[in-house]
Amino acid sequence: MDYFERAQACVQELQENRRYFHTHAEAGLHTPKAKAYVMEKLREYGLKPRECGEGVTATVGKGGKVLLLRADMDALPMAEESGLPFACPTGEQAHTCGHDFHAAMLLTAAKLLKEDEASLQGTVKFMFQPAEETFEGSRNMIEHGILDDPKPDAALAYHVSPGKLPIGTYLYNDSGAMMFSVDTFTIQIQGKGSHGAYPHLSIDPINIGAHIYLALQELIARESDPNDACLLTVGQFTAGSAANIIPDTAVLKGSLRTNKQAAREKLVRRLREVSEATAAVYGGTAQVEFTCSVPTLACDKALTQAIVGYMNELPIPNAVGYSGISASASEDFSLIAQRIPSTFMYLSAGFADARGDYPAHNPKVQFNEEVLPIGAAYLAHCAARWLAAG
C-alpha cells in the first residue's frame, strides 16, 4: 500500500477526528470522551479495542515482531484563545500541545494498517494514552499491561510542533538525551501561626518558604556541574488567608529537570536535604514529596536510524530531517523507552504567518492540519517497513 497516498485520501476524516478531540478537550488521567471516541472509531475501522487502564489499546496483524505505536490524547487545564471555530467551549481545557493531532493520526494509521493487514509481517500494537501532561498516562498503561500480551519489541511516537518551520520538517536525536527527566515536588512547610502584630510568637512558614526558595536556586548555581543541563523551577508558593495573620503552613510546588541521571540523583537528594535543613534553622519543619518522576528520554540509535530511513522512502514534500535535537521539556514516553528500544520525533505543524508566533501551551497557539496525513502515513509506513525488516 502507498500509505501516503491513502492517508491523503483520508484528509477529511483526519480533520474531523482531530477537531472532535479539540472541541471535546479533556485534561488529566480520566478522559472518558476521548476514550469512548477512540474505541468507537477503532471498531468502525475493523479493530477490536480494549481498555488498558485509563487508555485504549488494540492490535493488527498476527505473530512475529511487535511494534508499539503510541499517541497521547489529553489536553491542558487552561482556557483557549485560538479563535478557531472548533475551539473547546468550556474555558477550562484546551489542546494547546497538539495531542489531538496525535490521536487523530494514530486512528488513521490504525485504519490503514487494518486495510493492509494481510501484508503485515508481524503485529502492530496501538497505545492511546491520557495524562501525558501530568506524566501519569504511560505509567498507568504500563501498570495495566500495555507492554505485555503481546509484548512489544520496540516503540515509535511522534509529536507535532508549532512555530514557523516548514511542513515536512522532522526533528530527532539518535545519539543523546532528546528530552529531560522531570521530578515534580511538593514542599509542605509547618510553622506556627500568630497574629501579625506578634511575630515573635510565631514560626513563620512564609519566611521559611522564602529562604527555601532562595536556597534551592543555589543547587543550580553552585552545586550543579556547568557541563550538565539542570533546571529547577518553583511555580507555586501558597500560604495564608489574611494580611494580618501569620499562617501555620506554606506550600511550595515545582519541578526539577536534568539531562544526566547522575545529576538528577544528586539534585533530588540535595533538594530534600536543603529544604529540611533550612526549615529547621528557623524552627519549622519541611516535608518533601516527589509527586511524579520521569526519566530522561533517550532514543535507541539503531531504531531511530531505521525509522528515518523508512520515512525518507515516502514522497513527503519538503521533507527535511534535523538530528541531535534536545529539549528541556519532558515526556512520559521515556517510561516506555526505558523498557524497550524506542524512538520519538517531532513533526513540524507550524505556519509561516502570524499563526506561527505562539509556542505550545500558549492559549493562542495553532497547529497546521497539513501535517495530519504526513503523520498518519509515517506511522503506518514505518510500522509496516520495520516489521518487514525481520
Image (cartoon, rainbow, N blue to C red):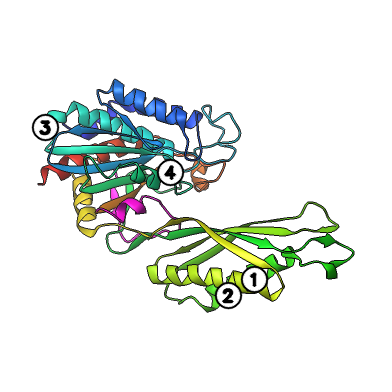
Considering only order in the chain, which callout, 3 or 2, is on the residue closer to the N terminus? 3
Lateral position of residue 170 relative to residue 224, left or right: left
Query: Mark 2, mark 3: which one is toward the viewer?
Result: 2
Q: Kindly identify which residue carries mark 2.
A: 218
Quarter assignment of residue 293: bottom left
Amino acid on which disc 4 is placed: Gly
The Cα–Cα distance between marks 2 and 1, rounded to whole angstroms, is 7 Å
Lateral position of residue 220 relative to residue 283, left or right: left
Query: Mark 4, mark 1: which one is toward the viewer?
Result: 1
Image disc number at residue 350: 4
Q: Kindly identify which residue carries mark 1.
A: 214
Considering only order in the chain, which callout, 3 or 4, is on the residue closer to the N terminus? 3
Residue 237 x/y as whole percent: 67, 57
The Cα–Cα distance between marks 2 and 3, rounded to whole angstroms, is 58 Å
Residue 390 x/y as whole percent: 9, 46
Q: Secondary structure at mark 2?
A: helix
Q: Is residue 233 magenta?
A: no
Residue 236 x/y as whole percent: 63, 55
The Cα–Cα distance between marks 1 and 3, rounded to whole angstroms, is 61 Å
Q: How many marks?
A: 4
Considering only order in the chain, which callout, 2 or 4, is on the residue closer to the N terminus? 2
| 96, above or below 284, in the image | above
Magenta part of the chain: 317-340
Amino acid on which disc 1 is placed: Leu
Residue 363 x/y as whole percent: 57, 42
